[in-house]
Image (tube, grey):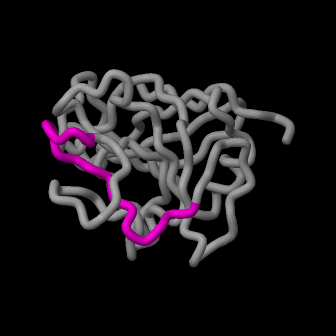
Amino acid sequence: MSGLLSTIFVDRCGFRKDGRERHVARLRFGMVSLPCRIGRSGIVHLKREGDGATPAFVMHPVRGFWRADRRLRPRTLLPMRPIRKGDGWCEVPGDRNYNRLVRKPYAASHEDMRREDRLYDVVLELDWNRIPRRQGRGSAIFFHLTRENGGPTAGCIAVDPRRVDFLLARMDQRTRFVVR
């Protein structure tokens, strides 16, 4: 694969004084600019669990997941594995598996990775709050697919499903997401 993306910029562009549309952003690399969606609270410098914000930070993709029952494996240099029945993501500060993939059933609150709404048909784990994990600083900052209505994420970065394969084909683990 040629033309690997070294840096992807995520810039807010929808902020208005009344606070509406804080979740509208642009994803830029080279001469290409695509619309994307971020958290309902916009971009923040001090991320907290449950705040609905996307952290202003430089993040790298760690690994990816896809719904093998819905689509083919994405073409990418990133490590990928199918989302399995029972895959969840722990979101409880204080739990020993906070901000980690877990197997369901799981006692602590967790997000189901096999979502019905298709947002995680393709999803990348970004390295936000991984090493060291800081309790309460936010979990599961993912790169995933947008909602049909163009609504906000819970703090992740989301792109149109028709664009995700184009982007993934140009990413590796050295790719940086610069959120500002």
Task: Please name the residue shown 31% across and 33% down the image.
Answer: 43
Q: Identify which residue, 70 or 130, lies in the foreground.
A: 130
Q: Identify which residue, 96 or 143, lies in the foreground.
A: 96
Magenta segment boundaries in residue numbering: 82-98
Q: Position of residue 158 (x, y in %)?
A: 46, 51
| Quarter of the figure with residue 25 | top left
* Looking at the image, residue 59 lies above or below residue 106: above
Q: Position of residue 38 (x, y in %)?
A: 37, 45
**Placement of the N terminus among the 4 image quadrants:** top right
Task: Please name the residue shown 59% across and 56% down the image.
Answer: 81
Whether the magenta-drawn stretch holds residue 84 is answered as yes
Q: Position of residue 54 (x, y in %)?
A: 32, 37
* Looking at the image, residue 156 lies above or below residue 55: below
Task: Please name the residue shown 34% across and 59% down the image.
Answer: 103
Q: Identify which residue, 41 or 164, lies in the foreground.
A: 164
**Placement of the C terminus among the 4 image quadrants:** top left
Q: Position of residue 30 (x, y in %)?
A: 71, 30
* Looking at the image, residue 8 lies above or below residue 26: above
- Left or right: residue 142 versus residue 76 is left
Task: Please name the residue shown 66% across and 42% down the image.
Answer: 78
Main SS of the magenta part reads: loop
